Image (tube, rainbow, N blue to C red):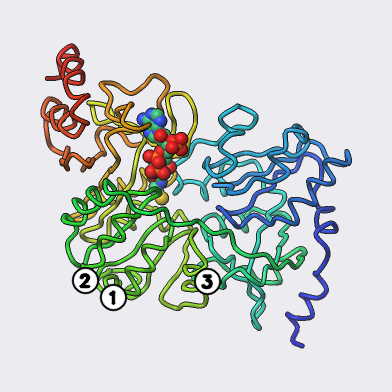
Amino acid sequence: MNQYQEMYLEKKKTAAELAMYVKSGDICACPTGQEQPVSICNAVGDRARNGELENVVHHHTLCVSGGPFTDPALKGKYDYVSWFTGGSCRKVIQDGTYSYVPNNYSTIPRYWREVMPRLDIFYVQVSPMDSHGYFSCGIAAAEVPAMMERAAVVLLEVNDQMPRVMGDNFIHITQVTGLCEVSVPMSELPNAPLSETDRIIGGMIAAEVPNGATLQLGIGGVPNAVGILLQEKSDLGIHTEMFTDSMVDLIQCGAATNMMKPIHKGKSIATFAWGTQKMYDFMDSNPAFELHPVDYTNNPYIIGQHDNFVSVNSCIEIDLFGQVCSESIGTTPFSGSGGQVDFVRGANLSKGGKGFIAMLSTTKGGTISKIKPTLTPGSIVTTTKNEVDFLVTENGIVRLKGQTARDRAKMIISLAAPEFRDELEFEAKKMHLI
Ligand code: COA
């Protein structure tokens, strides 16, 4: 047994014992997505339920499955703060039970380093320790170094089913206050079947992607379709925020080699992942795949160093001025800005770069147009009119950059469903846009 294994045993405790490090008023946080240490959070919840804790907060970007901090019975004792709304935690933000911190994803590490008053407890699920004393934070690097720098107490939940992933996401045993062990399967994000319209939109974008381009594909059916439809290309690179199953397919079929990238040649780069077990197996100890902190992956100046950078994201609604709402339905929060703006800006800085906002022209069975004269009152502007580049729906593809407001409005109307175009034109004329 080496010195690190001895330290491991000294620091090993139960989740209930680790929860005793948490004090009333503490700020707790874990990195993005499935990095939530479920057993430790549950043990903190038990203490809150027993009346031992007040005013503890849990900060989390993309909390997938909830936890005791979203139990309204624990309100005021152990409370959720969302940094990106989604999964089963959407409802408790929508009904106002808990709140969220507006942000572009790239800025979150800086908030933790410079803006947040302190971080009392950093707790995280990790893969098993290696012989050198290092734990990989598995499927997210996003906020890891920043939170590690700020945290007073570091608690690990070691899951033998968490993949060991390379990159800037390691924690050393000497930095750890205490740890516990679990064995739980990774949560999987099933791949929705591609619809005919997804294929049409994906095909139009794929036709715009040159061989050798570097890709970011966002969240949703359309970005996923683009990934699938790019399999005929060659020498693609991957520098993205969320790693997805369609990217694994691009690598395994030989379309993505990463060999044309100016930085991290030969490697796929992301900041977190969520997909199927097939994807987790691909990431495990794979030297051709690395996770890096989100202030690096999503930094527009890093993204812009890749020539022909292609970013594909989706939205809720766009107006005739080209303002893009991707995170609320009217006043109701639905998602977050995430890295959409980071990647739109990065693609704008890239020589030959292209940023696509892709969506179906209607929703709710064709009854609601996602193209509006002006954004629905209360809609949050995610990507501004000055930064939007290509817009794509099943009705076509247009490039808005460099066009007059009048021409842009006409181009946007041409992508609406035919039954909504007359009304859009009528409203555009009333606004003297066309
Ligand atoms: N009016 C009313 N409802 C709308 C709507 C609109 N304009 N647009 C979408 N909706 C509803 C849909 O009907 C659907 O409802 P349902 O769940 O009851 O069926 C729901 O909102 C989701 O819409 P959908 O188009 O299926 O979403 P998606 O899974 O393709 O995701 C975004 C689209 C915009 C939510 C997603 O891309 C996102 O979160 N973006 C912000 C973050 C981001 O871009 N990150 C990028 C870096 S990874």
Residue flagged by tag 1: what amino acid is it?
Answer: Gly
Work out whether mark 3 precedes mark 2 in sequence or the reverse, and give the earlier one: 3
Q: Secondary structure at mark 3?
A: loop
* Structural crowding at the residue carrying mark 2, measured as other residues with C-alpha within 10 Å and reported as few (<14), some (14–19) or many (≥20): some
Q: What SS does tag 1 mark?
A: loop
Query: In the displayed structure, does residue 342 sit left or right of residue 140?
Result: left
Tell me, yes or no, whether the two marked residues, 3 and 2, touch with CB atoms within 8 Å: no
Q: Residue furthest toward the top?
A: 430
Q: CA distance from mark 3 to mark 2?
A: 26 Å
Is residue 64 visible in this depiction of the protein? yes
Please provide percent x and percent y for residue 356: 25, 46
Front one among 348 and 91: 91
Q: Which one is earlier in the sequence, the residue at label 1 or at label 3? A: 3
> Of 351 and 239, which appears nearest the observer?
239
Q: Are marks 1 and 2 in contact (CB under 8 Å)?
A: yes
Q: Nearer the viewer, residue 86 or 355?
A: 86
Quote the CA–CA distance across marks 1 and 2: 7 Å
Q: Which residue is mark 3?
A: 165
Residue 362 higher or lower than 276, as above or below? above
Q: Residues within 10 Å of mark 1 (few under 14, many from 20)?
A: some
The image quadrant of residue 370 is top left
Question: Seen in the image, is 203 located left or right of residue 129?
Answer: left
Numbered tag placed on residue 291 in the rendering: none
Which residue corresponds to the image point at 30% horizontal and 46% vertical from the top-left? 345
Q: Which mark is residue 254?
A: 1
Amino acid at pointer 2: Ser
User: Can you give x and y, in whole percent of width and height, for residue 43 in the image?
Assistant: 80, 52
Q: Earlier in the sequence, mark 1 or mark 2?
A: 2
The kind of residue tagged 3 is Val
Is 123 drawn above or below residue 52 in the view shown? below
